[in-house]
Structure formats: structure tokens, C-alpha cells
Image (cartoon, rainbow, N blue to C red):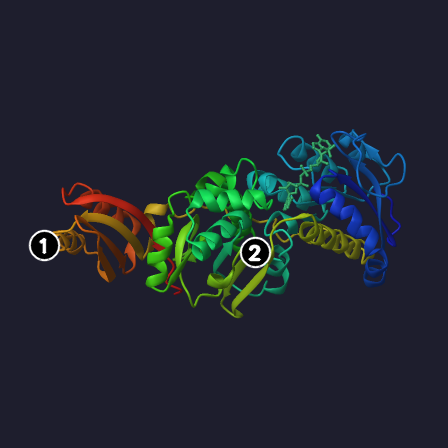
Amino acid sequence: MPHMAADELQIGLLGCGTVGSAVVRLLQTNAEEIHRRTGVRLRIASIAAANPSKPRDLRLDPGILTGDARAVVADERIDVVAEVMGGIDPARALLLEAIRRGKSVVTANKQLMAHHGPELFAEAARAGVDLRLEASVGGGVPVIQPLRESLAANRFSEVVGILNGTTNYILTKMAAEGWELGRALEDAQRLGFAEADPAADIEGDDAAAKLAILTTIAFGTEVHLDEVYREGIRRVSAQDIRFAEELGFVIKLLAIAREHGGKIEARVHPALLPRSHPLAAIGNELNAVFVRGDAVGEVMFVGRGAGGGPTASAVVADLIDVARNRRAGTHGRIGMSALRREPLRPMEETASPFYLLMQVADRPGVFARIASIFGEEGVSIGSIVQKSRGQTADIVMVTHTTPESRMRRVLGRIETLDVVRAVRNVIRVIDGE
Ligand SMILES: NC(=O)c1ccc[n+]([C@@H]2O[C@H](COP(=O)([O-])OP(=O)(O)OC[C@H]3O[C@@H](n4cnc5c(N)ncnc54)[C@H](OP(=O)(O)O)[C@@H]3O)[C@@H](O)[C@H]2O)c1
């Protein structure tokens, strides 16, 4: 049983890398501020690292670092375990063990929460301990807590996020400099905004994991990560961005969760956003989450989605929350114990306007043939731009809202036309409805 002095919170930290080190520094730097605000001293009792003898630029009491994470979890002095080591194994087993021992847990681990969130929530509810995960979505941007507490009175119709700083930086640079994706990615890597292996960011996997968590929190539904539709930004070209701009849009990688007709959809894909949409202004490596609630209307949270300092800000806030709960003699205010289990809406059943860029033969009658396919399939066209390039022409279209399945039929037919050289890209449009 963790010790009961409510004016002290003994923390076991699992991991001491980018985030873990920043948590240690923040707890030291703002120790007095935190004590004044909470009446509780937050103390780090023990820290687990893979290689505890590695030199670290931190002021630590001797003997506080260990290579034995299980011993930290089992330590009777420790009240709360903060997991900032990443990965699913052994993080999952360690957190389950901590919960089973009656310790509250805080995590920054999106992979773990996206794959095993419902299990961990259920175990924490059963044990009556706190499970906090603010840092796992949007880094330093407060998202989980506002959805669960400040906005808890609302029914949400949509939660839309820019949840991956790397791809947001890349798309911002492509728009500002006219670069193609490869060049913007190199620039992001040079500045440390992108990993050496950027696949998880570029393909939308990182944003999908965060969206799975957000959807669970906002709609109280169990989400399986493989049900979250994802499409990355690899096909987005400088030309798409220029055409989108001419039509009054910017291109962003969006993570969208919506409730419509009693069914929930969760999808990550590049999207054209009207320049007037609040998310359109979120540039560079920033993250943002835009929420529509029935009572509050529109709310948006913006800030740094990664980096030691911002992420530690969220982890330490969660620790403070646990400390306050203990002081008040309460815990387990999870609010996630009864998750709905319904499949998400399949992508074929969603609808949106579409942007299409195609290259066609530049001769009379071509456009009429394309337009007739749209007409026959019942897809109406909102705007068209045509640019001649001599032998060929680029045609850009934006349709009105169209069911995904119908759009796929149109594309299948257009691609067989001999006058169509290539369908360069098809991107969904957010109409702001
Ligand atoms: N970095 C960010 O900007 C950011 C933002 C939001 C969320 N997160 C999440 O925060 C978590 C940590 O990220 P990070 O960037 O801080 O990672 P990191 O720099 O790679 O640090 C990982 C830490 O975990 C330790 N570790 C690894 N395996 C361990 C084991 N089996 N037992 C004990 N310790 C172990 C490592 O020890 P050594 O130091 O000895 O190698 C290291 O200290 C991840 O879940 C990540 O997704 C990170």
C-alpha cells in the first residue's frame, strides 16, 4: 500500500530520456510554485532507465537511478508511477502492476494508450486509482483534461486535430517555399522536427494513435486502432498546394472524429481546409485541436505538441492532479469506466466534398466526357480550374458533398478514359459544416 502522507507525493519515474529528464527539471525548477498551488511536495523517489550508468545532465540524488523498472513499481514508498519510457512492452505490464498495487499512474505513451487504453481504464477503475494521460495527445496542449472536465457538459459533434507536428511543419514549408515533400522533410530533419525514420509521421500512423485516444475520450467509445482510417501526406505535391490556394484552401493532415446519425467516424488524411477555418492558421510544428460542442460551440486548443518541456508540462500537471486528489482524500475520478463498444462507421459510408487534380489531353470535348461521368453518377461539381500545358491540360475540380463510395465509382470510370493521362491526386475537403 502506498504511504499515506497527503502533503507529499512520492513519484516513481519510468524513463529518463527527453521527456523524463524534462519532468525532473520541471519538478525541481517549479518546486515552490507547485507546493504553493497544491500544498503538496512532489518528490521523485526513484527513476528507472535502460542504462542507469549513462551520464545525464541532471541534478539527482545518488542511488535514485536504477535499471530495474519492476522494483520501482513494487517500491512501497511510491504513490504514483509516471511512465515516460515509451513502447508497449514492458510499459503495459509495468502500469498494470502499478495499478494492481493501488498506485495511480500517469503516462505520455500514445502507442500504449491507443492499443490498450480500454484495458488500462478498466483496471484503474476497478482498483480505484487515477489514470492520467494528458501528454499522450498533443504533448503540451491541454486536450484530454478539457474534454473530460471543462467541457464535460457537452455533447460533441466533432473533434478535429492537427496532431502531428512533423507533417504540419512539412506542409507549412511546402506552401511557403513551393518545395516538394522530400525537400521539406529534409529541412524538418535538419531542425530536429522529424525522426531519421519519418514513416510513422508521414503515413499518418502517429496521428491515428492520438486520434484513437481522443475519440475514446470525446465519445466514450472503445476504439480499435485498426478501425481508424489513415492516409498520409506522401502524395501531396507542391502543385496540389498551389491549386488549393487558388481555390481558397490550405492543405493540412487532419485527424477527424465525428458523431453523425448515432455513429462515430475516426479518420486521418490530408484535407483541404477553407482559409477561414480556425485550424487553417495553425502553422509550422504546432498542434491544435478544434472541438464543436452543443453548448459551448467552437473551441480550439493550440500549442507545442512535442519536445521535452511542453510534454513535461502535461506530465507534471497530471502528477499535480493526482496529488490534489490524494490531498482531498479522493481518487479514481476517471470517468471512463463505461465505454461503448460499437464499430466505427466504415470509410465507404462517410461523405465529403472532394478535390481532384487530373492531367488530360488538351482537345475539345474532353471536359464534356469527364463531366458526363460525374453527372451519371450523381456527383455535382462546385468549382473547376483548367490550365493548358500545350498537349495536355491540368483540370482541378472540387465536388459538392459526395458519398465516398460514389466518388470511388467516378474515379474508377474516369481512369479508364483514354483522354485522361493521370489522376494526380484526390483529397477530401472539409466544408466547415
Ligand atoms: N519526445 C517527445 O516530444 C514526446 C511528446 C509526447 C509524448 N512522448 C512520449 O513520451 C515517451 C518517452 O519519449 P522520449 O522522447 O522521452 O523517449 P526517449 O528519449 O527515448 O527516452 C526513453 C527513456 O526510457 C528509458 N527506457 C527504455 N526502456 C526502458 C526499460 N525497459 N526500463 C527502464 N527504462 C527504459 C530510456 O533509458 P536510457 O536513458 O538509459 O536509454 C530513456 O531514459 C514516449 O511514449 C513518447 O511517445 C514524447
- Label number found at residue 286: 2
- Above/below status of 204 relative to 304: above
Q: Is residue 295 left or right of residue 31?
A: left
The CA distance from mark 2 to mark 1 is 46 Å
Q: Secondary structure at mark 1?
A: loop
Q: Residue at x 31, y 55 (%)?
A: 354
Q: Position of residue 133 (x, y in %)?
A: 65, 48
Q: Residue at x 62, y 34 (%)?
A: 88
Q: Is mark 1 within 8 Å of ligand 1?
A: no
Between 139 and 193, which is closer to the camera in this rendering? 193
Which numbered disc flags the more N-terminal residue, 2 or 1?
A: 2
Question: Badge 1 is on which residue?
Answer: 364
- Above/below status of 14 relative to 429: above
Q: Position of residue 215 (x, y in %)?
A: 51, 51
Between 111 and 311, which is closer to the camera in this rendering? 311
Q: Residue furthest front?
A: 390
- Above/below status of 130 relative to 73: below
Ligand 1: which quarter? top right
Q: Position of residue 79 (x, y in %)?
A: 81, 44
Q: Quadrant of the N terminus?
A: top right
In which image quadrant can residue 70 be found? top right
